[in-house]
Amino acid sequence: GSDSSAACESCPAGTASATQGAKNSDKCAPCRPGTVAATAGLSECASCGGGTYQNDTGATNCRDCEPGHFCAEGASAALPCEAGSYSNKTNLDSAGGCEDCPEGHACTTGIVTPVACRAGTFAFGSRNAVCKPCRAGTYRNAIGADRCLPCGRGSFCPIGASLELPAACELGTYPNATDSDGLPDCLPCTSGSFCPGGAAPPTRCAPGTFASSAKQSVCKICAAGTYQHEMGATRCRDCDGGHYCTEGVSAPLPCPHPLGSGRGSVTCSVCKRDYYLLDSSAEPADIFENPTRHCKRCPPDADCSARGTTLETLGVPPGFWRASNLTTELHKCVASDHCSGSGPVAEVSRLRLAASGSDDRIDAAAREGCNAGHTGPRCEWCKSQSGYFDRAQRGCVDCPVASMRLFNLAGVVLAVAATGALFYLAITRVAIFGRAGARTAHRLTHIEVRVGFQPKLKVLISFYQIAGTLGPVYGVRLHE
């Protein structure tokens, strides 16, 4: 006969399948980002090695990690070296491969080559993200300086000075023209600029500085939590959310993943949405240095939609119950309408939580989450002393009245006693009517022995006693 079997075909490169007996190529799944299948016929895709990444689906090879970035094993994207560090090498496999920015230079996020500080600015020490302008009374006429020099006598040096200037007009003013005596006609400097005095013209404030009023001899440095990217500014801008701003920066710096921040932040010490802070008492500096150790993915069924969620403030949705504010495990309630959850989550300042005191913090986050009338684990206890939780009814029901149970028991006992009395009377009355009656009595006695009337009576009474305890003791309700 003819051979009806078909030869198996290999899944193409860039795909893989672990399914046996597949009939078509639909079972060949494209490799997800971060994995590749270099050849055909593979059962699973291989993760990209450290120093490489792949951001496409169905790829056959991994990309080299570009300079200024690093790629951990299985990376789907290259991550930039953080501000204050750089790398001119390819295939870095961790942030530890990024080098510290040398003194006299500045390194922004993901930079390949450090940028030397221009004249009039400096960068003291290593790991500087920006160069700072020389303070008033100092100057520097060289690039790549790690410090500024003091201004000499008889001269003046404004903020960011690259040269010493001869003194003429007073501080905060500049020469506009000369009068008949040959002396300069000095005018006040306008806001957004500074006038160091002498013969220097007005100079607009550099990015990262501002002058809010007129007749300023120096521009003030933007405080931490603010920035200014424009020249000639009269004020600084609040740092954008999701960023942090150190003193004197011209642009906000992005928070490291998975941290976030609100407007005007000087550091990043709260977890962004869909993450929670494991220990709200941790120091902000340690959280910033080790974000992935402190911020964890939101547990299953929990609500972390608010930025700044902590372990204590995890959102518990309706229908779920949490034993305490120190656990991430949520339990689904049998009677979901009894578990109200924690209510809508809201953005909470971690620092404000810590300042409020640990007791208040725990009380606010560890509410029972039970609707009125319910308490205990999964809200299955009844607060009322006269009721119990009936699983069949999925709610609290009143305990049976003791007098009613006694009345029912008395009724059963009387009914059984009446049956026994009638049976005995039948035997004794039949015995009066002679031999035929004796035979009938003997037959009834034999039936009583075979049936086992007395043991069954005892079993019936015991069953009623057990049935009477099922509801109040075990929460079981028998069908009527």
Image (spheres, rainbow, N blue to C red):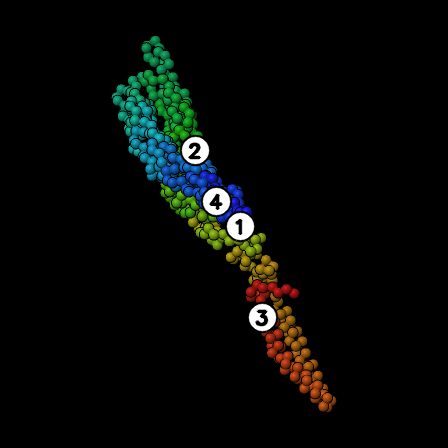
| Tag 3: amino acid | Ile
Dot 2 and dot 1 residues touching (CB under 8 Å) = no
How far is disc 2 from disc 1 in space, using C-alphas?
35 Å
**Label drawn at residue 341:** 1
The residue pinned by badge 4 equals: 17
**Label drawn at residue 239:** 2
| Tag 2: amino acid | Cys
Q: Residue furthest front?
A: 1
Residue 398 point in image, percent of width and height: 60, 62
Q: Say which label, 4 or 2, has the lower sequence index.
A: 4
Question: Which image quarter holds the C terminus?
Answer: bottom right
Q: Secondary structure at mark 1?
A: loop
Residue 446 point in image, percent of width and height: 65, 84
In this view of the protein, which residue sits in the foreground, 210 or 59? 59
Q: Residue furthest right?
A: 433
The residue pinned by badge 3 equals: 466
Q: Say which label, 3 or 4, has the lower sequence index.
A: 4
Tell which tag, 4 or 1, sits nearer the viewer: 4
How far is disc 1 from disc 3 in space, using C-alphas?
37 Å
